[in-house]
Image (cartoon, helix red, strand yellow):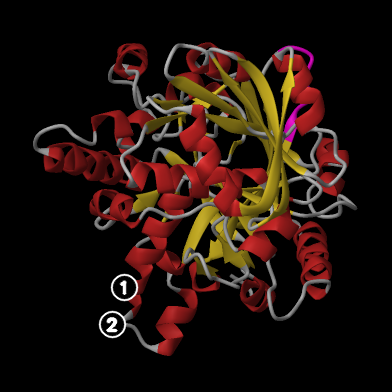
Amino acid sequence: MTKRREQMAVHGLACADILVPKAGIDLMKWAVVACDQYTSQPEYWHRVAMMVADAPSALHMIYPEVYLEEEEPHKRIKAINDAMEEYLKEGIFDCHPASFFLVERKTGGDRPGRWGLLAALDLDEYDYRSDSTSLIRATEGTILDRIPPRKAIRKHAPLELPHILVLIDDPKRSVIEPLAKKRSHLRELYNTPLMEGGGSVSAWLVDAPEDTDAVFDAIEALYSALDPANPLLFAMGDGNHSLATAKSCWEDIKIGLTDEERACHPARFALVEIENIHDDALTFEPIHRVLFALSSGGFDAEVAKVCDRFEKVGVDSLEAIDALINAGDGVQRFGYADESGFWVYSLHKGHHTIAAGSLQTVIDSLLAQEKCTVDYIHGKEVTVTLGRTAGNIALILPEVSKATFFETIIADRTLPRKTFSMGEAQEKRFYIEARRIVG
């Protein structure tokens, strides 16, 4: 890194030495969706393995989490590390030093492409604890038990492959969008369709000083506008547990390093894709809840504990629920459905900033009392179908507001787990690039 880029790392951002497969590698077989997707669908990963076979592929360098409970995981981990070493030895990668990548992801239909910036983030500026006020932080609670198995995979790996998506709050579209407008003047590195309905992805090299400096200057402007006491610059979108794993590994590594070695050690950084929360193509989907084996009376008793008072109004349809809970009038609301009909709850002086926080407190209390079980569901229609079965309750969350997302994280520190999803499984990031993480 140049001195300029090292200095900018104090704001959490750095260029990276980014590796991509050389020309001639079949990128459709190489690119594989994030390892934490399709965890209940082993048939998906079986199809991927059949398609890839022995071809060069990121599949050989990742641990799909559907297999985390398999016997003798160390064998798969060794195979992953061996594949990384073999690919490095064979010279399968081109290296683009001290660079960013501009990335465009298209997921089909008439939807516009979603823009991202592949960059390195400084793990010393990241803190996933719920009371964090760091530059880089989690948006949902980090489950510490998820770190050790992921750490076993990363601990001896010479490479990292990024599936982490990080958000910036850039309403003026000053960081990524200027690069997108001038992409015809940038060098295109790849353009490939993605397997299993993943759409397509393209990338352009950003390494000219005027372009990298423009990114740093725009980040500097965002940073300068933050509250010094609570300066949230980069908020996790997807892959928080992977970033937490990288952080944990770095904390172990840096113990034995000098200050000079710590400043530039590659494990201090993690390769991520940064996206602007205001990108029109970036979708936020609320994750709904279904409670099993619970009465409405038991539910209402817990709701009363998370606000000064609440109102419960009957409506005639899911559409009516949608209209009321997304009215945008400042009242905290959520939808409810059971075998008797549809309802909308309005909470007054709730103890949390958003409905998801209030509901999660209710659910956690009910679970602690062993009064019900819960499942987290994508899709309102599926949620209502399950909730209207006798003995069940569907809870419909309002849309996640991009406009207040960062404000909510700053106010509440983190969102409740399973609050939102950035698109469906096939829209998650695919592994293409890599970066060395050994000194």
Residue visible at 19% across and 34% down in the picture: 69
Separation of marks 2 and 1 at Cα, in angstroms:
6 Å
Taking 353 as reference, is 74 above or below it?
above
Lateral position of residue 272 relative to residue 260, left or right: right
Task: State the residue in front, 123 or 415.
Answer: 415
Main secondary structure of the magenta stretch: loop
Taking 80 as reference, is 374 above or below it?
above
Residue visible at 51% across and 18% down in the picture: 387
Is residue 414 in view from this perspective?
yes
Q: Please state, as top left, top right, bottom left or bottom right, where the C terminus lies in the image.
A: bottom left
The numbered disc on residue 302 is none
Residue at disc 2, secondary structure: loop
Residue visible at 42% across and 48% down in the picture: 365
Residue at disc 1, secondary structure: helix
Q: Which range is magenta?
A: 109-114
Residue visible at 79% across and 39% down in the picture: 279
Taking 34 as reference, is 124 above or below it?
below
Q: Are marks 2 and 1 in contact (CB under 8 Å)?
A: yes
Q: Position of residue 319 (x, y in %)?
A: 76, 16
Q: Position of residue 424 (x, y in %)?
A: 57, 25
Q: Position of residue 350 (x, y in %)?
A: 68, 54
Badge 2 is on which residue?
256
Residue 56 highlighted magenta (yes or no):
no
Lateral position of residue 411 relative to residue 366, left or right: right
Circle 1 Cα neighbour tier, 10 Å, few/some/many (<14 / 14–19 / ≥20):
some
Q: Please state, as top left, top right, bottom left or bottom right, where the N terminus lies in the image.
A: bottom right
Taking 188 as reference, is 233 above or below it?
below
Farthest residue, direction bottom:
259
Task: State the residue in front, 130 or 359.
Answer: 359
Badge 1 is on which residue?
253
Q: Position of residue 237 (x, y in %)?
A: 59, 46
